[in-house]
Every structure is written in C-alpha cells, then in structure tokens.
Amino acid sequence: MSIEKIRELSIIKFPKSVDLREAEGLLIYLAENLPATINYRASHFMSLNGWGEKKYTLDYDGTTDIRGTIFAPKGGNATMDSFSFEHSTGTSKLKSIMFNLTPGLELPDYDIGARRMWDNTRNLVKQYFK
C-alpha cells in the first residue's frame, strides 16, 4: 500500500474549519464517546497592541497548534496513538486530525487497535459535525 493511501487513512478531515474552542469541544466529545483518555497540548499565538486610543487591540490572531495522544483501554487491549491538528491554509483555524505515521511502515505494520481507533475517531468526528 502506498504511503499516500496510508496517510489518507490516518487523516480525518472536518466538514468545516474550527477554532481552538471548537477543537477542544471535539476532543471532549471524542474522549467521552470512544471512550478514551486524551492528553493534549494547545497553543495559540496572539499579538496584543497596547498603543492607541483603545485600552488594547488584537493585532494578530495567529497560529493554533494542538498535539496529543489518545489512550483507549478498550476490552483489555489498550491502544495509544499520537495525533496533531492540521491548519487550514491562510487562517488560524484547524481542518483535520492527523494520526502520526512512522516512515517506512506499511499499513499491516500499524497496530490493529490503532487502525480501529482511526476508524472509530473518523466515525465520531462525522457524528460530531452532523
């Protein structure tokens, strides 16, 4: 299987781009419904200007970055995988979740539990945006 096909399976695209707050709402939904423990780090770059007539102005609403892990201890077969959110071009919004791939691995080399998690996460993302 080509790396492009594996990459396609590991990326979950959203029907619309989301901001940090919406992305965190999605992560809560996933944690409750997989069920899983989701550990993540989120950062959002902003620039505040204190010079001018107003007390301050938001000059730049910049890049949002979310990275983490999903741990699903389902039925005695614990599964863990790392993920990050992908940015929409030219905005601070996020357009997809990408599970991290290991260069050189073929699809059968990935843990079956991790591949199921990709599918379960994809289905829950579809439900979330309905």
Image (cartoon, helix red, strand yellow):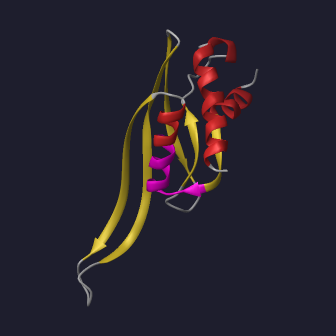
Farthest residue to the right: give it: 1
- For residue 38, what is the image quadrant? top left
Relative image position of residue 79 (x, y in whole percent): 51, 17
Eyeballing the image, is 56 above or below 119? below
User: Is residue 110 in view?
Assistant: no
Extent of the magenta region: 17-27
**Viewer can see residue 67:** yes
Q: Horizontal and vertical percent for residue 73?
A: 47, 17
Q: Decide if residue 28 is on the left or right side of residue 15.
A: left
Quadrant that contains the N terminus: top right
Residue 44 horizontal/vertical position (percent): 38, 55
Looking at the image, residue 40 sits to the left or right of residue 128; the answer is left
Q: Position of residue 122 (x, y in %)?
A: 65, 36
Residue at x 59% of width, y 25% of height: 117
Residue 22 on the magenta span: yes
Quadrant position of residue 110: top right
The residue sitting at 35% across, 64% down in the picture is 46
Whether residue 36 appears in magenta in the rendering, the answer is: no
- Residue 75 in the image: above or below residue 92: above
In the picture, residue 10 is in which quadrant?
Answer: top right
Among all residues in the image, which is located at the extreme top? Answer: 76
Q: Residue at x 26, y 79 (%)?
A: 56
Q: Main secondary structure of the magenta part?
A: helix
Left or right placement of residue 82 versus residue 7 in this view: left
Residue 60's place in the image compared with 40, above or below, is below
Q: Residue at x 59, y 16 (%)?
A: 113
